[in-house]
């Protein structure tokens, strides 16, 4: 029970801390789905901004990174608690990853790519 609360808290913190990052990624994905690929100069600027965000410690990006790390740690603890019972997972064959969730940047990118290919 306490582990579920810790995971819920970590997920809430991640959602709050990463709101700006998710919004920016979602905005680009939505635009590309509506209008197609960005013009080369806009894609370059966006990619350059992304690179700078990864290299330069920007406060809201760092908070997001730390929140994601905490979420993954709490998720792993909960997953270990379920799989430690006699060494078998509670759900046979289930070993989901937090990065598979649709509310991650990677998940949004996969959704956008799939939707674009379905057109």
Image (tube, helix red, strand yellow):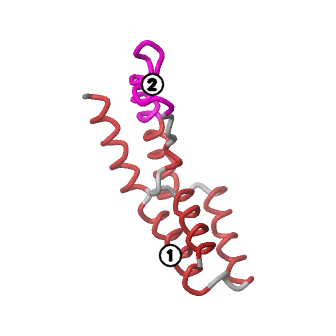
Q: Is residue 15 above or below residue 68?
A: below
Mark 2 highlights which residue? 89
Residue 16: say if magenta: no
- Whole-angstrom CA distance, mark 2 to mark 1, is 38 Å
The nearer-to-camera label among 2 and 1 is 2
> Residue at (51%, 70%) from the top-left corner?
24
**Looking at this view, is 72 or 21 the one in front?**
72
The relative height of residue 75 versus residue 107 in the rendered view (above or below) is: above
- Residue 96's x, y, as percent? 49, 39
In the image, residue 58 sits, relative to residue 88, either above or below, namely below
Neighbourhood count class around disc 1 (C-alpha, 10 Å): few under 14, some 14–19, many 20 upward: few
Crowd around label 2: few <14 · some 14–19 · many ≥20 (10 Å): some
Which callout, 2 or 1, points at the residue further toward the start of the chain? 1
- x 56%, y 75%: residue: 28
What segment is highlighted magenta in the picture? 73-93
* Residue at the spot 40% in from the left edge and 16% down from the top edge: 85
Q: Residue 7 placed where, x, y %? A: 35, 38
Residue drawn at 58 percent across, 64 percent down: 109
Disc 1 marks which residue?
27
């Amino acid at each position: 029970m306490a582990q579920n609360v810790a995971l819920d808290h970590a997920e809430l913190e991640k959602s709050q801390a990463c709101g700006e990052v998710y919004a920016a990624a979602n905005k680009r994905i939505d635009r590309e789905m509506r209008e197609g690929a960005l013009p080369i100069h806009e894609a370059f600027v966006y990619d350059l901004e992304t690179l700078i965000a990864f290299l330069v410690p920007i406060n809201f990006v760092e908070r997001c990174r730390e929140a994601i790390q905490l979420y993954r740690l709490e998720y792993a603890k909960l997953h270990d608690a379920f799989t430690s019972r006699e060494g078998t997972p509670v759900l046979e064959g289930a070993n989901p990853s937090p990065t598979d969730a649709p509310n991650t940047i990677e998940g949004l990118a996969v959704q956008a790519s799939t939707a674009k290919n379905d057109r």
